[in-house]
Amino acid sequence: MSEKQKKNHTQIIEEYIDHHGLKKGSLTNCSVKGYGTLDVVLISVHDDGFDIFLLKDEAVSNVISYIWSQFSEVEIDKFALSTEFSLLGEKEVTLKITEDKPFYSQLEKHNIKMIFKKRKWQNKLLGFRSQNKLKMAIATAIYLIAILLIVVPIVAYNLPSAKQERIAIEAAKIKQEATEKEDREREAVEAKEFNKKQAANKKKQDENNKELEIATKDRLKEYVDNSDGLLLKIEPMTNSWEHVYAFVSENFKTMSLYEKESWVNEAGLDIKNRIKGGGIAADPRVYFVYKDQSKLAVPDTFNESYKIKD
């Protein structure tokens, strides 16, 4: 079974109670006098009594059940982290329970006489309960080390030199944060100014491009007007002047191949130079077409001339 699927001790006991029809109660860890210190033991406290479960290899190996009527009194020894209950009467059993409220509640409910053992507060601490000198010496050393681990850092933290260092670090931090804030604000202003300049430059460039296009269109119109009716209009194929339609008249359909080649090569170069000179395209390609866009001639890129398609 994987770690994620592995059941904890409480789940094992709860399933055991369900499968064996035992009464459900409040489950908690405990130790029982007579059991080994490393044994895993849980106790289920309910209205009728309590059941003690011993676990071995992740399974219940033994169950001992008691009812409250079997006990007449109990000696209670309260420690720092647990409570020891020595139950006396028809049966006798000594338990040490961490979560002792449910057990106390049932003792009161069943009128079992409770005798509280008096101890000095220090004798309730781990290592001092048995009054064994060796255990007390070890416990004292451990407690002193624990106190030192707590107290020394606190004292060191509150030393004047430590306070001055913290003040200096905090001041440096505040100064750094202020510098970083100033840098961010300056960068934001610079970015805003840059974007503003970029927008202004783009607007100016668009205006210049528009003026260049208007001037180029005027030159192309003048060229069309001076073509003796052979050219009808010149316009870009799309929004770019890199590809251009030069619309021609139907007169070319009756011309000889030589006349067509001579005219389109000369006109193509003129149109291309006017567009390049206008600054609206770097290397325009001119296509000579009729009104219905059927082709008269297309550019021959490799020979810088035109091929008649008519």
Image (tube, rainbow, N blue to C red):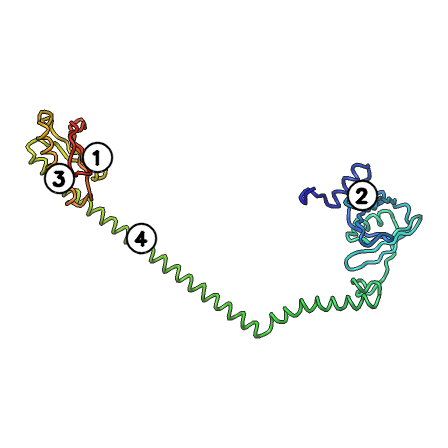
Write down the residue under mark 2.
60
Secondary structure of the residue carrying tag 1 is loop
Q: CA distance from mark 1 to mark 2?
A: 90 Å
Categorize mark 3 by other alpha carbons within 10 Å: few (<14), some (14-19), many (20+).
some
As helix, strand or loop, the secondary structure at mark 3 comes to helix
The Cα–Cα distance between marks 1 and 3, rounded to whole angstroms, is 18 Å
Is 293 situated left or right of 109 in this image? left
Give the percent coordinates (x, y) of residue 269. Answer: 13, 39
* Circles 1, 3 touching at the beta carbon (< 8 Å): no
Name the residue located 77 percent from the left edge and 52 percent from the top edge: 99
Q: Earlier in the sequence, mark 4 or mark 1?
A: 4
Mark before the other along the chain sequence, 4 or 2: 2
Q: Find disc 1 in the rendering and name its residue.
A: 237
Q: Position of residue 262 (x, y in %)?
A: 9, 34
Q: Residues within 10 Å of mark 2 (few under 14, many from 20)?
A: some
Amino acid type at mark 3: Leu
Q: Is residue 80 above or below residue 282?
A: below
Under mark 4, the amino acid is: Asn
Give the CA separation, mark 4 to mark 1: 33 Å
N-term mark: 1 or 3: 1
Q: Nearer the viewer, residue 278 or 271?
A: 271
Indicate the quadrant where residue 178 lies.
Answer: bottom left
From the image, state whether disc 4 or disc 3 is nearer to you.
Answer: 3
* Pointer 3 residue: 269
